[in-house]
Image: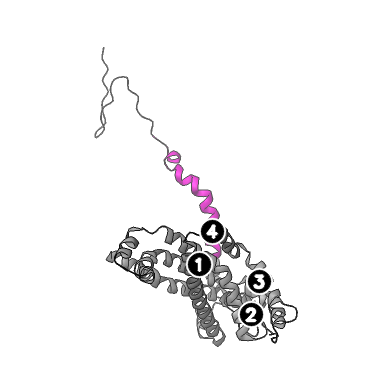
Amino acid sequence: MTTRQSALPGRPALAAGARRPRTRGWGERYIQYWLILPALLTMCAVLVYPLAYSLWISFFDWNITAVGRPFLGLRNYLEALTNSSSQFIFVQNIAFTVICIALEFVIGMALALLLSRQFIGRGLARTLLLLPMLTAPVLAGFNFRWIFNDRFGLANQLLIQLGLQPYAWLADANLARAVIVLVTIWQGIPFMMLLLLAGLESLPTSPFEAAIVDGASAWQRFLHIALPLLRPVIVVAVSLRVIDLFRTFDTIYIISFGGPGHATELLPFYIYRAAFSSGRFGFASALSYIVLALTLLLLIPLFYRRRERQVAD
């Protein structure tokens, strides 16, 4: 005796004795989303909520020393953009970033080209040149603060041994700026060198061999072959360093505390003073978002030019 199973409209009939497949429930169907939910909630708690809350208070006169928190709208942003002190700090931070990026790129590229060659002790040289990047910014700040101390610092002791006059390094505005730039590029060069070295060693050899056959010099091969091929790596390295330089705080706090005057004060330290010295958390939050927008404006041309070249290729 045969049994018949009627099929639902639009669904094939099951054969005799076959079991209908079990349909997955809602929980099983979206199991991948349940698995990432704890990480997503953690990110919202430690990242999204603070960002949203700081954006909210940037529209208020959020001063911990005053009674009441009146709504100001965009006045905190307008003050941050029109205040003479803020404008000076903005220009100083941009100049600091451009100088550090230029020096780090030139020195990092030179070291990357040197370390891409075969020589005795190359592995040891690579290890030693990476040590500044592994040093904590606070520790580097204490070390350089001792080196450039005007009384017993190593720099002045060397000048005295050479018969020269010692300098008050951190009391002079230009010398203090030079010290901050020196500390910053000392820690940033290994990162730039590492990325450029990895890019150089990943380049194809056939264009260089063809250029050698055509009689191109080493400088011509570097300028017309290596640099264009390294452009994606350079964009990534410069972008990461721009983001990092706009967060420079530790070394300035340890070495000069923004002084003398405001000579070495950058945007993160200015935001810190506005929030924790003056108690103006609304103004400091507005400054933070302006810094974020400024960083994005500096990075957009880099990625835009890279995308243009990719489309052209």
Residue 141, labelled with which disc?
A: 3
Of the residues tagged 3 and 4, which is closer to the observer? 4
- The first of marks 2 and 4 along the sequence is 4
Badge 3 amino acid: Gly
Q: Which residue is mark 1?
A: 111
State which quadrant residue 233 falls in: bottom left
> Dot 3: within a 10 Å radius of its alpha carbon, few (fewer than 14), some, or many (20 or more) residues?
many
Q: Which residues are magenta?
A: 23-52
Badge 1 amino acid: Leu
Q: Is residue 73 visible?
A: no
**Helix, strand, or loop for circle 1?**
helix
- Specify the quadrant that holds the C terminus: bottom left
Q: Contact, CB < 8 Å: mark 2 with mark 3?
A: no
- The first of marks 2 and 3 along the sequence is 3
Badge 4 amino acid: Ile
Q: Determine the CA span between mark 2 and mark 1.
A: 31 Å
